[in-house]
């Protein structure tokens, strides 16, 4: 699953940049379904909740400053990257560091929603 998780990050990044194909989207969706099934015993709610807790713990004050919609967007995106259960906290820390070295939480959340076709 480690190779699949690394592959998922590459696919999701390509999709997010607008360079992904329909095949990429289908593969990313299949990978997410497999991640839930194999690593979370089919319990998507538990998987997403664990991702939310890891992000909250690692993002600290940045997390509390975000509104609920932005937090939800980041939880969705982080979950879709299919982090491994045993390394959720370090992966959430890496996610935080990547966001902070980039455009920041609010701008990234807006960009994710734009790519998903959600209105602001």
Image (spheres, rainbow, N blue to C red):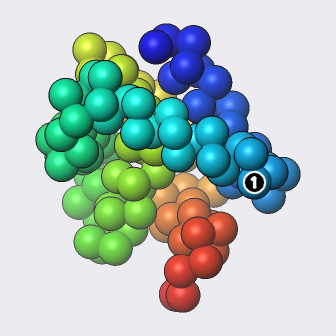
Judge by depth and name the residue closer to the eye, 111 or 106.
111
Drawn side of residue 11 relative to residue 82, left or right: right
Question: Label 1: which residue?
Answer: 22
Q: Is residue 112 above or below residue 43?
A: below
Label 1: few (<14), some (14–19) or many (≥20) C-alpha neighbours in 10 Å = few
Residue beneath the point at 35% across and 52% down: 75
Residue 35 occupies quadrant:
top left
Q: Position of residue 87 (x, y in %)?
A: 32, 17
Residue 51 occupies quadrant:
top left
Residue 98 occupies quadrant:
top right
Q: Position of residue 15 (x, y in %)?
A: 71, 51
Drawn side of residue 51 relative to residue 100, left or right: left
Residue beneath the point at 46% across and 44% down: 80
**Dot 1 lies on which element?**
helix
Judge by depth and name the residue closer to the eye, 25 or 51.
25
Q: Position of residue 38 (x, y in %)?
A: 31, 23
């Amino acid at each position: 699953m480690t190779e699949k998780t690394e592959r998922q990050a590459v696919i999701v990044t390509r999709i997010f940049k607008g360079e992904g194909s329909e095949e990429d989207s289908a593969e990313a969706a299949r990978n997410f379904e497999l991640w839930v099934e194999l690593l979370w015993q089919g319990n998507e709610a538990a998987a997403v909740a664990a991702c939310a807790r890891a992000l909250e713990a690692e993002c600290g004050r940045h997390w509390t400053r975000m509104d609920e919609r932005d937090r939800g967007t980041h939880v969705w995106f982080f979950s879709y990257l299919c982090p491994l259960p045993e390394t959720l906290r370090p992966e959430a820390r890496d996610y935080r560091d990547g966001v902070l070295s980039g455009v920041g939480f609010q701008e990234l959340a807006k960009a994710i929603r734009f790519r998903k076709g959600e209105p602001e």
